[in-house]
Image: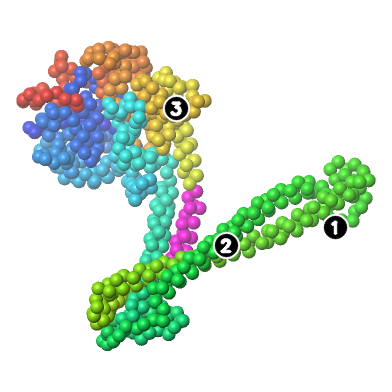
């Protein structure tokens, strides 16, 4: 069960209260002239339901109203929510007043209001009051973290501003904002009831595991780079040999990682530096460059071998498929005898029709020989495929090792080149040796921090197994099927209402597109979106039909969406372009039909749905006439802000 609105109130600084009463479970129309505050009612509802911004417009409201408030009712429960206007240069207010009242209680006095509830706590309280499980986390596209549903998301289905209700490009409230559009796509399945809370939790776990796997791979890569036998370490050891810090290594032997680390530690701690540079039989940089050329050639050969093996595997697969199909045709569903059969009388009969013929045996023999040959080839080729795949895996391992060797070789070349460049600036051998010791010392400090830090444990296999298990449990098609099913049922309701409103494309299937967040008519010429249907009456009609249909679904399925819909100026599409206040609508019958359709939905939901409409039009026909709650006109002096509150001239603006 969720809530409706029983009153919208404003306070001036003197504490005087102006309340606009509303009837839950009914249609409520506030009609009147422009710029008298009708549109502000929607903004007050939005602001008091924990908007992040100060959405109130109009100079009169901003000048003379100190506090905005709404009274919410749910069964016998009543919640009064008030929010002050920003003071000074503040952009908005971040504390509100939330008070539980006895059912039917009037708005409290200004002095009794305590604005002590932070905005985020107010959102949580209002979400609870609406029945929204704000502890749930819903994964959203382009969002680093899953987001909890809240009252703010639910309002996308409850508000239709004047520039939204007939908008061809937007269907839902707030859809023009990128972040709101992303959130709405994620939240639509939840509010429709297609999201299983357990599934949402598993999806969150899956996202976290995938992130852990990425972080694990990055950490392992970093650990490999920081290893003591890296190209940088080997290059520094070569510099130590050249600077005379260490004796020349034995020729032709590759030093182990432990030997490299030990040599660097000896080089940095030796005191007998600069005793003469050690000459190598061959320049180390030349050796490294030649080694790189050899590695690249080996890398190219292995890549070519892998490509050839993959081509062979593809050809094997293609042959196996064609041969199996050919064998199946020859076998003719088992009508032929086994090749080894000696049932000669039977061999004189046609294997298909059973007739006797003297030359049938020869034909059957040829077919059987083909079958034997194909069986042998299928066995031979089929048995070779695993061997080819094993060779591919082996060669790919070699390729990965070569890539690592190339990376290390490049590191060694870069480090040695940089060291020699730095050493060339120092002619004194002592200073050159000291500079090499400083570079080695810096490297060892970095490596020591890596050694002393927590060691990376390779858990990729375990994380991968958990990811596989969750992916199998989730089966993305399950939620997609539920969502498609529920939207299909809502589409049926939209279709019925579009027929009642005599909209275009009622002869075609009509559907909500949950990704594009629009209405689509499926025609023989292709899909036609709301923006392509043309005409303000179509846009407004499909907006209203969609919102009414969604609220029918929310009510029938007891979904946690507030049971009210606020429509601002739906009759705007029926007024002449140069219409002034009081100008009759161009199509009264169509406008009346709109209100009859709204009333039919309200009646069908038996008090569980409320519609609040702000209008220029004022019809004498039912159900419009009985739904009017207030008439704000200049002729009778009525407006949202009482005339006596205004103590000085303020320009009239939209929203007043």
Q: Quadrant of residue 66?
A: top left
The CA span between labels 1 and 2 is: 42 Å
The CA span between labels 3 and 1 is: 66 Å
Front position in the image: 7 or 149: 149
User: Disc 3 marks which residue?
Assistant: 528
Q: Secondary structure at mark 2?
A: helix
Task: Check disc 2: other Cα within 10 Å, few if <14, some if 14-19, many if 20+.
Answer: some
Which callout, 3 or 1, points at the residue further toward the start of the chain?
1
Which callout, 1 or 2, points at the residue further toward the start of the chain?
2
The x, y position of residue 91, in whole percent, is 16, 40
User: Please, what is the dominant secondary structure of the magenta stretch?
Assistant: helix
Q: Quadrant of residue 409?
A: bottom left
User: Disc 2 marks which residue?
Assistant: 305
Q: Quadrant of the C terminus?
A: top left
The answer to whether 113 is drawn above or below residue 380 in the figure is above
Picture disc at residue 340: 1
The x, y position of residue 229, in whole percent, is 39, 75
Task: Check disc 3: other Cα within 10 Å, few if <14, some if 14-19, many if 20+.
Answer: some
Which callout, 2 or 3, points at the residue further toward the start of the chain?
2
Magenta span of residues: 458-475
Q: Secondary structure at mark 1?
A: loop
The residue that appears at 43% across and 20% down in the rendered structure is 504
Q: Are marks 2 and 3 in contact (CB under 8 Å)?
A: no
């Amino acid at each position: 069960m969720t809530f409706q609105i029983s009153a919208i109130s404003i306070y001036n600084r003197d504490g005087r209260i102006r309340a606009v009463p509303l009837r839950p479970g009914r249609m409520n129309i506030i009609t009147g002239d422009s710029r008298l505050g009708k549109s502000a009612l929607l903004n007050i509802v939005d602001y008091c339901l924990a908007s992040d911004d100060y959405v109130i417009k109009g100079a009169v409201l901003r000048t003379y109203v100190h506090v905005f408030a709404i009274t919410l009712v749910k069964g016998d429960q009543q919640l009064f929510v008030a929010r002050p206007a920003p003071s000074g240069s503040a952009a908005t207010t971040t504390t509100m007043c939330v008070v539980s009242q006895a059912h039917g209680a009037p708005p409290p006095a200004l002095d009794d209001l305590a604005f002590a509830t932070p905005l985020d706590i107010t959102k949580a309280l209002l979400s609870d009051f609406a029945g929204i499980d704000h502890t749930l986390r819903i994964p959203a596209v382009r969002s680093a973290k899953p987001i909890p549903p809240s009252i703010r998301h639910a309002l996308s289905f409850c508000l239709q501003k004047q520039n939204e209700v007939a908008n061809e490009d937007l269907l839902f409230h707030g859809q023009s904002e990128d972040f709101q559009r992303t959130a709405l796509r994620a939240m639509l399945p939840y509010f429709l009831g297609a999201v299983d809370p357990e599934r949402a939790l598993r999806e969150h776990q899956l996202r976290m595991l995938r992130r852990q796997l990425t972080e694990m791979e990055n950490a392992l890569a970093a650990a490999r780079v920081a290893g003591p036998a890296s190209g940088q370490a080997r290059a520094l050891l070569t510099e130590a040999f050249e600077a005379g810090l260490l004796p020349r290594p034995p020729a032709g032997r590759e030093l182990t990682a432990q030997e490299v680390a030990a040599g660097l530690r000896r080089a940095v701690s030796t005191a007998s530096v600069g005793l003469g540079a050690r000459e190598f039989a061959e320049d180390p940089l030349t050796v490294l460059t030649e080694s790189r050329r050899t590695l690249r050639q080996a890398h190219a050969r292995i890549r070519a071998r892998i490509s050839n093996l993959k081509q062979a595997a593809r050809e094997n697969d293609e042959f196996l498929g064609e041969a199996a199909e050919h064998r199946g045709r020859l076998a003719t569903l088992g009508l032929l005898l086994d090749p080894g059969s000696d049932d000669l009388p039977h061999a004189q009969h046609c294997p298909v029709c059973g007739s006797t013929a003297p030359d049938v045996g020869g034909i059957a023999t040829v077919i059987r020989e083909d079958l034997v040959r194909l069986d042998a080839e299928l066995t031979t080729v089929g048995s070779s495929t695993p061997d080819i795949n094993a060779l591919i895996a082996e060669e790919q391992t070699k390729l990965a090792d070569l890539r690592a060797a190339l990376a290390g070789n490049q590191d060694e070349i870069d480090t040695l080149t940089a060291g020699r460049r730095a050493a060339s600036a120092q002619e004194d051998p002592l200073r050159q040796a000291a500079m090499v010791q400083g570079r080695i010392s810096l490297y060892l400090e970095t490596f020591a921090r890596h050694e002393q830090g927590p060691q990376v444990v390779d858990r990729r296999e375990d994380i991968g197994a958990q990811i596989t298990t969750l992916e199998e449990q989730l089966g993305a098609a399950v939620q997609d099927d539920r969502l498609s099913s529920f939207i299909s049922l809502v589409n049926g309701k939209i279709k019925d209402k579009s027929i009642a409103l005599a909209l275009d494309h009622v002869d075609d299937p009509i559907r909500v597109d949950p990704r594009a967040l629009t209405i689509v008519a499926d025609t023989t010429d292709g899909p036609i979106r709301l923006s392509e249907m043309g005409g303000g009456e179509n846009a407004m009609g499909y907006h209203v039909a969609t919102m009414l249909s969604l609220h029918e679904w929310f009510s029938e399925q007891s979904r946690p969406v507030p049971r009210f819909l606020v429509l601002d100026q739906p009759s705007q599409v029926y007024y002449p372009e140069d219409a002034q206040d009081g100008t009759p609508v161009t199509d009264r019958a169509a406008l009346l039909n709109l209100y009859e359709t709204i009333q039919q939905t309200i009646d069908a939901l038996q008090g569980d749905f409320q519609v609040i409409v702000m209008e220029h039009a004022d019809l004498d026909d039912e159900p419009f006439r009985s739904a009017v709650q207030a008439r704000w006109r200049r002729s009778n002096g009525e407006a949202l802000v009482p005339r006596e509150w205004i103590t000085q001239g303020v320009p009239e603006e939209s929203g007043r």
